[in-house]
Image (cartoon, helix red, strand yellow):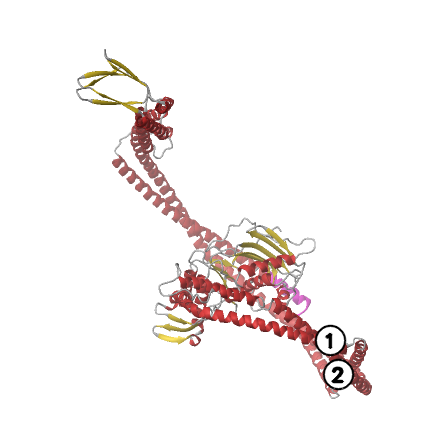
Amino acid sequence: MRLHRIRLRDFRGVHDREITLAEHGVTVLQGDNEVGKTSTLAALDLLFDAADSSRRAEIRHAQPAGVDAGPEVEAEVSTGPYRFVYRKRWLRRPSTELSVLEPARQQFTGAEAHARVTAMLDETMDRVLWRTLRVEQHTAVGQADLGGQDALTRALDRAASGPTGATGSTARPDPSVDDGLVARAADELRRYRTPSGRATGELRAAEVRRADAEAEHERCRAALEAVERDVAARDRLDAELAGVRARRRAHGDEVAELEDRWAALQSRLREVDAARGRAVLARERAEAARERREARDALVAAAEADAAAAETAAAAVAAHEAEHAAAHDERDARRGADTAARADAVAARRAADAAARAVTAARDRAELADLTERLRRVAEAQAGLDAAERVLADTTVDEDALAELEHLARDLLRAEAARDAAAARVELTAPAPLTVVVDGEEVPLGPGETRTLPVAGARALSVPGVLDVRVRPGLDEAGRDDAVRERARELADACEERGVADLEAARAALRAADDAARRVEEHRAALARELVGHDHAAALRAAHDAVRRRLDDAPAGQDDLAALHTAADEALAAAEEAANRAEEADAACRTAEDAVRKADTRAAVLAERAADARHAHTRRVEELRAARAEEPDAALATAEHERLTRAREAEREHEALAAALAGDDPDTVEARVVNARAVAERLAGEVARLEREHAETTGRLQAAGHQGWHDQLAAAEAELDAAVREHEAVTRRSSAARRLHESLTRHRDRVRRSYVAPFRAQVERLARIVFGPTLSLEIDEDLRITHRTLDGTTVAFGALSSGAQEQLGLCARLACAALVDPADGVPVVIDDALGHTDPERLARLGAVFTAATAAAGAAQVVVLTCTPERYHGIGAATVVPLAPSRRPRERGASDRAAPVHVADDVPAATPGTVLDLPRAPRAG
């Protein structure tokens, strides 16, 4: 199984987030606590396992707090030959949607979609391995239960068998334990139980019948017991109700007495409260008088401080005048020096520019000569190329045509050979020197010489003055002669069609064409060399003309580039030196200008401060004069004393009244009154409750009288006995099938103990990256690590430190993922592990992740962490930072802001790329 992407909407604290995972290798999902990392894994489990109609606790807890929306999860998954997009929403408008993308496109909804996904996962995915290779948050990594995992067993079978059926030291499993026999035993067992051990088929039906019978029996028995309990409860309620009513009447008298005492204390409490109010008011007036007097004292002190500040500011203005004038004088001097330095720099730059133009003109003259020569060579190469291309254009024979002509020539030779081989022959033997005329051609013969002539066609032989002979071939010989003439005619027609006289002429024409092609390549190479840096000859000509035009405007001069470069360098150095002097003068001028501006600014600031200080002092004096005119200082002191005296008198009066009231303990009386009222309410509620329970019990007893629970219990007991007998029979058959399967599997497993070797090799390969080359491990038949040996010291796994245990446990899981065939594999999910691992081994574990996922088609590993530094050592990891995804704040029913989504054409994540983008909802 491969996870391609997961999307959450309104799931716990996640408003809308889509995560794309690398299909192979390691994906690290990093983010702070409560950002939704573990929620992603929990959402995936709910998507696969919980129907959209479910309301189990984990689904209710997934609903976001304070939001009327149902949690929604969508995932794109590949498993076996299938690839599909699966989406569910719970609680609010529940829905299930499935789009199967491969191998054939299909769409399902509702319960049908849930059933289809369950069927695909059961068919292609090892769910036990999926749970085994996960490390949940806040759980120790420890050892995984890898023994008996089907996918790992198949992988280890292939590893132990080797590429050709057996390794040098590991034999194939014993043929006496045929896998087909084990499979048939497993099929028999699956009649009764699923691979995960759940009952099915007959056993499931028997269990369901027994469970239903037990439930019905228990229901009837419980109903009878409930009737008996109701009878006893009604008697108990009668007694309790009489007792509570008696306590309620007795408590009423006590409540009346306490209410009278509390009413008498109410008026005295009001008098004390009034005295306390008068005391508080008098104290507040005294505090107000004190605050007015203190404000007057503060105003006097402030007026004196403002006078001192005005004198200080005036002194600072006078002290700055000399510094201000000196800054202006220095600036004027620097301006004159800067103007002179600028003039010198301009003159030196003009001389340097003139020298540079002379160097450029000399370079242009040299470049013009080179371009002229290149144009001449280009013209020659172009002429040769045109001539060779004309030869190629006039050539009518190519390799295919020559091959065809040679094929026709060979056909002609074969026809002639066949004709000559089958033709009759005439032998001429001369006893004395003789001349014979054959078909008009004289053939001299010496004494005893024999000449053989084939008779392919009609032939005329003559001995002049002696004998004339005409030889005619039979019908077969004439047909072969016609075939020779036909082949000759075809060869002649083919040569005429291609414009050549014969086969040799065609070969000569092809050799001429090859030579022309070679010359074309040579001339084109020459053109390419001469036109380097230019697209065509016209561009080279344009460059030549441009250089010539530049020289028309250039001054005449010498062509000694070395001398010109020396002069230009000297002029440039002089210009740079003059420019440096000008820059220094400019910097000094700017410094003087800055000093003047600072002096001007400080003078303005000091003047403003002096003015502000004078104005502040004037305002403060006016404020003090107005305040004294309104209320003199002596009047403020007298008012403060009088109000303080009245406040003390009011406080003494309140204290006396409060002391007199405290003797009667009003708090205790109030507490008893409140408690008595509560007791009365409680007794009234208890009476009402008992009366209600009594009525409910009486009603249940009346209803139970019509149910016939005794007869129903007898029928339920009979059905339970029959169901138990049927279940025991099916269970015996199921146990026999289980024992057969376990026996065969145990025998096969004994043969497959060699599986431990490849598994140990894979785990040790990864673990040595962490612990070093001296590490070795002992692994039992259940593929659990029992001992670790390091530097010659052997320690049991349980005695290792927590860090070492979690490091070995992680190596074992990654080894399993690396061994399992990609078609059987499932993602390895690690949720915030390695908390006990030191920094050095964390860095080495990064190499372990890389080594375990380096192969083509490697496993998919997903790491969720709030401490990303633990996994910085993974070289080829795809890192996905997770930021909080909060629901936008609602503004109102009419102007609520729509959620913002990123366009769907965002580039896909690659290893090392960080993406945390919200996605727009997909159509459908």
Q: On the image, which quarter does residue 510 sit in?
A: top left
Q: Amino acid at mark 2?
A: Asn
Examine the rendering and report whether any part of residue 275 can be seen. Answer: no
Identify the element where label 1 is drawn.
helix
- Residue 485: % across, % down: 35, 22
| 459 drawn magenta | no
Characterize the magenta stretch by its predominant secondary structure.
helix
- Between 70 and 356, the residue placed more toward the observer is 70
Residue position marked by numbered label 2 in the rendering: 675
Residue 560 vs residue 555, the one in the foreground? 560
Q: Which mark is residue 715?
A: 1
Q: How many marks?
A: 2
The range drawn in magenta is: 618-635
Identified by mark 1, the residue type is Ala
Q: Position of residue 102 (x, y in %)?
A: 55, 52
Compared across the picture, whether 828 is left or right of 772 comes to: right
Q: Which quarter of the picture shows residue 815?
A: bottom left
Tell me the crowding category of disc 1: few under 14, some 14 to 19, or many 20 or more residues within 10 angstroms, Cα based.
some
367 left or right, relative to 696: left
At which x and y percent is residue 809?
A: 45, 69
Q: Which mark is residue 391?
A: none
- In terms of image quadrants, where is residue 539? top left
- Residue 479 at x, y = what percent? 37, 24
Q: Nearer the viewer, residue 888 or 531?
A: 531
Q: Earlier in the sequence, mark 1 or mark 2?
A: 2
